[in-house]
Image (spheres, grey):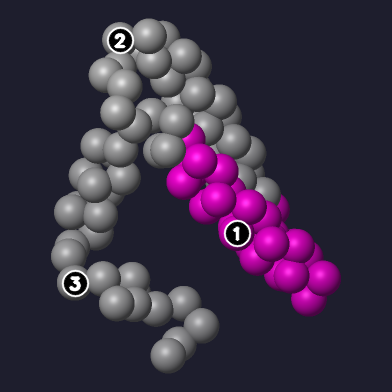
Amino acid sequence: MTTHPTNVPNYEGTLEDLAKAIGNMSYNQTASFIEKLALDLKEQADKDKARGRTQLATQLYNTTNKLYEAKDNMEKAWRICKPYMPTE
């Protein structure tokens, strides 16, 4: 397996299918996924920075910051719709 594969290992669907599946989760779970993605990219940025790849690290840090902003917005969306969600 390459360092950065072009697909998700063990996932048979398309990236569009994956995006729709994540987007259709409850907003708090989507926020959690976005946060986990941000954490992973930050770890990659830290490693790239340590290797002297400052331009790449900077772009990954920028992406991470936008993902944290997206996570915060999803959490706000969750707080708005949570009272209307059916309980299991």
Mark 1 Cα-neighbour bin, 10 Å: few <14, some 14–19, many ≥20: few
Q: Which residue is mark 1?
A: 40
Q: Nearer the viewer, mark 3 or mark 2?
A: 2
Q: Can residue 66 be seen in the rendering of this structure?
A: no
- Locate residue 46, reporting x and y percent: 75, 62
Q: Nearer the viewer, residue 77 or 59?
A: 77
Q: Is 84 positioned to the left or the right of 44 in the image?
A: left
> Considering only order in the chain, which callout, 2 or 1, is on the residue closer to the N terminus?
1
- Which residues, given as a range, are shown in magenta? 31-60
Q: From this view, report whether residue 36 is shown above or below residue 80.
A: below
| x 20%, y 53%: residue | 16
Q: From this view, report whether residue 48 is shown above or below residue 5.
A: above
Mark 3 Cα-neighbour bin, 10 Å: few <14, some 14–19, many ≥20: few
Which residue type does callout 2 highlight?
A: Tyr
Q: Can residue 45 be seen in the rendering of this structure?
A: yes
Q: Nearer the viewer, residue 52 or 81?
A: 81
Classify mark 2: helix, strand or loop. helix
What secondary structure is the stretch in magenta mostly built from?
Answer: helix
Structural distance between the alpha carbons of marks 1 and 3: 22 Å
The circle drawn on residue 11 is: none
Q: Is residue 47 magenta?
A: yes
Q: Nearer the viewer, mark 1 or mark 2?
A: 2
Q: Which residue is mark 2?
A: 84
Q: Which residue is mark 3?
A: 12
> Considering only order in the chain, which callout, 2 or 3, is on the residue closer to the N terminus?
3
- Using the rendered view, name the quadrant where residue 62 is placed: top right
Q: In the rendered view of the protein, which quadrant contains the C terminus? A: top left
- Locate residue 2, reporting x and y percent: 45, 87
Which residue type does callout 3 highlight?
A: Glu
Which residue type does callout 1 highlight?
A: Asp
Structural distance between the alpha carbons of marks 1 and 2: 32 Å
Q: In the rendered view of the protein, which quadrant contains the N terminus? A: bottom left
